Amino acid sequence: MSKLLDKILSRENMLEAYNQVKSNKGSAGIDGMTIEEMDNYLRQNWRLTKELIKQRKYKPQPVLRVEIPKPDGGIRQLGIPTVMDRMIQQAIV
């Protein structure tokens, strides 16, 4: 595993990413999991998820498409990733 991937997946970095995602208070993605449910999910699944990332086998979930009406009458299309995918993305940046 590369040093960069080690750094990305470090406990300290992942905790910082988790806290950032939690503070954003975003909506659930296509899997329906909220940030409140993520604690329990991570306790049960983090080792497997981390191993999948290390082996380059982790596959992000599809994004949830949402249409938000604009004040001028148009529509803004959003793509909402799952909270797990947001945490992993945050850990990378």
Image: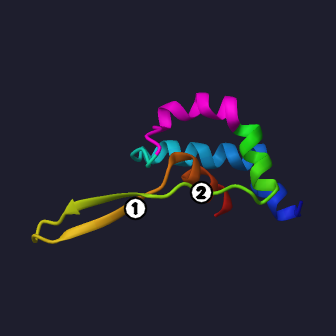
Question: Which numbered dot is residue 3?
Answer: none
- Choose top left, top right, bottom left or bottom right for residue 74: bottom left
Asked whether, in this view, residue 32 is left or right of residue 54, the answer is left
Q: Quadrant of the N terminus?
A: bottom right
Q: Position of residue 76 (x, y in %)?
A: 25, 68
Asked whether, in this view, residue 82 is left or right of residue 64, the answer is right
Q: Is residue 44 part of the magenta span, yes or no?
A: yes
Q: Position of residue 12 (x, y in %)?
A: 75, 45
Asked whether, in this view, residue 48 is left or right of residue 38, the answer is right
Residue carrying label 2: 60
Residue pictured at 60% horizontal, 32% vertical:
41
Are dots 2 and 1 in contact, CB under 8 Å?
A: no
* C-alpha gap between disc 2 and disc 1: 13 Å
Q: Position of residue 8 (x, y in %)?
A: 75, 56
Query: Which of the pair 58/91 is nearer the observer?
Result: 58
Span of residues in magenta: 31-45
Say what amino acid the circle numbered 1 marks: Gly
Q: Position of residue 27 (x, y in %)?
A: 39, 46
Residue pictured at 10% horizontal, 71% vertical:
72
What secondary structure is found at the residue carrying circle 2? Answer: loop
Picture layout, residue 44 above or below residue 68:
above
User: Could you tell me what secondary structure mostly forms the magenta stretch?
Assistant: helix
Residue carrying label 1: 79
> Sequence-wise, which precedes: disc 2 or disc 1?
2
Q: Is residue 15 part of the magenta span, yes or no?
A: no
